[in-house]
Amino acid sequence: MNTGRLSDYDHPSIRTKAMELTISKINRVDKIESLFYFVRDEIKFGFPPKWDRVRASETLQYGKGYCNTKATLLQALCKAADIPARIHTGLIDIEIMRGIFPSFAFPFLPGSGGHSWMEVDVEGEWKSIDSYINDKPLYEGALKRLQESSKTTAFSISQAKGKSSCEFNLGEKGFVHMGAVLEDHGTWDDFSEYMSSKKYSSMNQMQLMVYPMIAVFSNRNIKRLRLK
């Protein structure tokens, strides 16, 4: 087992889940779609005990994740199903977490943070996808709140550059976070490679100390949004 990768597609739990989700699917797009809906809805949007350095098998066990950890899980499931997949990274406007993170957290956070989404190979062309990030109940509740506000970016949704979506689509019908991406940091075979690069913005010691409390309050806010 390759333990150096965060996208640990050779982990038994990942391989078993990938097979379970794709065994009845014939073509690649149908397989990706099946994996997509599992990651979107069965892995709820939320914050686990650790930040970023989370293996795909751990996210599967937690049953929740955010942009970076859900991307790593979807990549691992794709690779376990023999679907070429890679991670695309960049910086995202932290305002996308307004209404998710508690208000007290923002003074401790930078204006932007590391972000990732997925790319899959479909007929020799890399297709971007990020609409798996928010589970559907969260997306619907958050979209309602966003529409009620004067904002285009908040509640884990950005419509700053066009309409958003939580449905399966390979970039053609909208994204959920891409409108808030500020800087492109390119593609990587594994998120751990990005974390080891100079482009990655790591949390400082204070932010790491505060993170567990932020996670608790954020998960409560997310739960409330799903009820809207």
Image (cartoon, grey):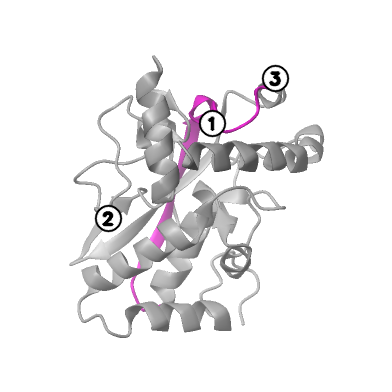
Residue tagged by mark 3?
Answer: 107
Residue 67 shows up from this direction = yes
Image quadrant in which you'd find residue 37? bottom left
Q: Secondary structure at mark 1?
A: helix
Q: Is residue 193 left or right of residue 173?
A: right
Q: Is residue 106 left or right of residue 126?
A: right
Q: Is the Cβ of the residue at disc 1 closer than 8 Å to that at disc 2?
A: no
In the picture shown, does residue 84 fall above or below 169?
below
In the image, what residue occupies the spot 50% across and 37% down? 225
In the picture shown, does residue 156 fall above or below 111?
below
Q: What crowding class fits label 1: few (fewer than 14 Cα within 10 Å), some (14-19), or many (20 or more)?
A: some
Report x, y in % for residue 43: 50, 60
Q: From mark 3 to mark 1, how far is it between C-alphas?
A: 13 Å
Q: Amino acid at mark 1?
A: Met
Report x, y in % for residue 25: 25, 80
Mark with earlier residue (3, 1): 1
In the image, what residue occupies the spot 36% across and 40% down? 176
Foreground pick, 48 / 220:
220
Report x, y in % for residue 22: 33, 79
Residue tagged by mark 2?
Answer: 168
Q: Is residue 221 left or right of residue 206?
A: left
Q: Amino acid at mark 2?
A: Phe
Foreground pick, 139 / 207:
139
Q: Which residues are magenta?
A: 81-103
Q: What crowding class fits label 3: few (fewer than 14 Cα within 10 Å), some (14-19), or many (20 or more)?
A: few
Residue 84 magenta-highlighted: yes
Residue tagged by mark 1?
Answer: 97
From this viewpoint, which residue is outermost toward the top? 150
Q: What crowding class fits label 2: few (fewer than 14 Cα within 10 Å), some (14-19), or many (20 or more)?
A: many
Mark with earlier residue (1, 2): 1
Q: Is the Cβ of the residue at disc 3 closer than 8 Å to that at disc 1?
A: no
